[in-house]
Amino acid sequence: MNQENAVLDRYTEGANQRQESLCCPVDYQTELLKILPQEIIEKDYGCGDPSRYVREGDVVLDLGSGSGKICYMAAQLVGDKGKVIGVDMNNDMLALARKYQPEMTNKLGSDRVQFKKGKIQDLALDIDAMEQRLASNPITDANALAAFDAWKHQQCTQEPLIADDSIDLVVSNCVLNLVNDVEKQQLVDEIFRVVKPGGRIAISDIVSDESIPEHLKENKELWSGCISGAFQELEMLKMFHDAGFIAVTYDKWSDTPWQIVEGIEFRSVTLTAIKREQTECIDKGHAAIYRGPFSFAIDDEGYEFPRGQRMAICERTFNVLNNEPYKDSFICIAPAIEQDAKEWCSPAGTLRPAKETKGSLHSVNTSSSACC
């Protein structure tokens, strides 16, 4: 089975007539749907609402943007200073999304949404540019093939569809499972490449509780229907962590399976993560106290946090722990007098004496206003 062709065919049908079997129940932010054309809403297919993670001013990339629904929802949240880019491979879906761009530009008050043709597992290759190149320079012999390969390399490196470190938030809604298994690692690596250091991802997708046997993967209805290409639940977490993301979390998890096939449960989840800042780990005297409830925690960089202990951390880790999704779990303490910066050399589990931070302003996240 050619899985990519099966997906293109299925979603071409979905662009022309609503496919109920592609839909998973989702509680979208209804206030963001009010200005969207009904056709975009009806011909959108997903299993979550990653638009909930969009912040004002973000540059947002939507992988597999389809009818454009998530893009147009996100555009209302990023404001005039933000931007939303949708990437899709299906001509019919791109045509549907672009059809309403003038109307949505007028409603939004600015032109802040664009749609690009590309494969989500190869965000460097501009498919529109490639097709134009092939139309004017058809491959008829080995020399023409070599020239095309050289053009493709130049385009991907010098004018990539999505540039390195350019995106604040990558979102996707039930699309990663449509990518062939042999390209899933490349897909995750490409997501990591385009996210800015400190940037985020919010991926709504389908996961399985068990490994999926090959005969189910060969079923084109199950594959194009967002079932048999699903990540196994642990595999998805591990793949994003191994790519270099931190704070990899199932922020949303459907208690009820969407479908059960041969005893395997398939459910919708939303995975969130952060791209670690690409800065040196410098010690300036910062500390963090793990609040609990567990007796012990270890972060993705190997820092150890026994509950209640004032642990030495570098400035980079301080900045991470003092923000979502960690800040409710840690008391982050800046030094009373910033120490001379030195390259981090303290082993994991090093305590920070209270006298080194005493008198500083503590970053304590609490709903109470009690003073002491």
Image (tube, grey):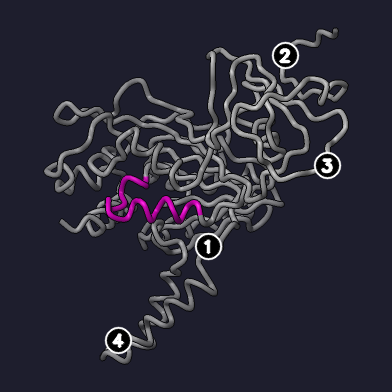
In screen coordinates, is 177 left or right of 323? left
The amino acid on which the numbered mark 1 sits, given as a three-letter code, is Ile
The residue located at (85%, 25%) in the rendering is 360
- Which of the two discs, 3 and 2, sits closer to the camera? 3
Image spot of residue 29 (x, y percent): 53, 32
The amino acid on which the numbered mark 3 sits, given as a three-letter code, is Asp
- Which of the two discs, 3 and 1, sits closer to the camera? 3
Circle 1 residues within 10 Å: few <14, some 14–19, many ≥20:
many
4 or 3: tag closer to the N-terminus: 4
Name the residue nearer the viewer: 74 or 323.
323
In screen coordinates, is 86 left or right of 291? left
Name the residue nearer the viewer: 5 or 15.
5
Image spot of residue 238 (x, y percent): 39, 39
Where is 355 relative to 75, above or below?
A: above
The alpha-carbon separation of the residues under discs 4 and 3 comes to 61 Å
- Can residue 107 be seen by looking at this rendering? no
The alpha-carbon separation of the residues under discs 4 and 2 comes to 66 Å
Q: How many marks?
A: 4
Which secondary structure class fits the magenta region best? helix
- Which of the two discs, 4 and 2, sits closer to the camera? 2
Quadrant containing the C terminus is: top right
4 or 2: tag closer to the N-terminus: 4
Q: Secondary structure at mark 2?
A: loop
Disc 1 marks which residue? Answer: 162
2 or 1: tag closer to the N-terminus: 1
Image spot of residue 90 (x, y percent): 35, 59
User: Magenta part of the protein: which range?
Assistant: 175-192
Disc 4 marks which residue? Answer: 139
Q: Secondary structure at mark 4?
A: loop
Disc 2 marks which residue? Answer: 367
